[in-house]
Amino acid sequence: MHKPILDERQRELVTHILAVIDKPAHWTRNAYARRGDGLSTYAVDVQARRWCMAGAIKKVVSRSRIGDWDKLQREMDDLYPQLCQAINLASEGEFATIVELNDGCKNLAELRRIVMEAMEVSVDIPLYESGPFDVLVFALDEDNDVPF
């Protein structure tokens, strides 16, 4: 049985993230975000004009969870490990993390291609676990053949 690594909500978020970094003028490396003058800044800075992928994630998730820090943190905590796993599989192990992909890819087109592939990655879920099983042995009472 196959199960997508990213659930429907996470795939929706990733689509919005890719919309933030939709062209080279909106993408950066080595900083979460940059202002128009090129200085690095926070991902949610209203003066930010360019984002790395991690910064775009923060921007998108923050926008969807305004005023609710706990839900924001949970959504970020849920998205990061799954997205990293999907990126690792989609890039065949070349990029293990979001930051490695953002800062190590050839260009934005490669980043977008790998992320689009990552959105579709599934993993095999076994229907049952095979392996050693514990066997309980009960001593039977002479008068009763039931082990309890």
Image (tube, rainbow, N blue to C red):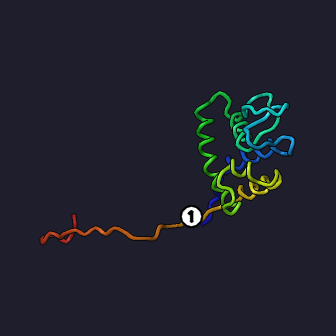
List x then y, in percent, for residue 55. 72, 39
Q: Quadrant of residue 135?
A: bottom left
Which of the two residues, 98 or 57, is positioned nearer the viewer here?
98
Q: Residue at x 62, y 64 (%)?
A: 2
Picture layout, residue 110 above or below residue 51: below
List x then y, in percent, for residue 47. 80, 28
Classify residue 127 as left or right of residue 38: left
Q: Quadrant of residue 133?
A: bottom left
Q: Residues within 10 Å of mark 1 (few under 14, many from 20)?
A: few
List x then y, in percent, for residue 7. 65, 51
Picture layout, residue 99 above or below residue 55: below
- What residue type is disc 1 on? Ile
Classify residue 77 as left or right of residue 24: left
Q: Residue at x 68, y 56 (%)?
A: 95
- The local secondary structure at tag 1 comes to loop
Q: Name the residue at the left extreme.
A: 143
Q: Which residue is mark 1?
A: 125
The total number of labels drawn is: 1
Which of the two residues, 147 or 139, is positioned nearer the viewer here?
139
List x then y, in percent, for residue 72. 63, 35
- Give the quadrant of the N terminus: bottom right
- Give the quadrant of the C terminus: bottom left
Q: Quadrant of residue 36?
A: top right
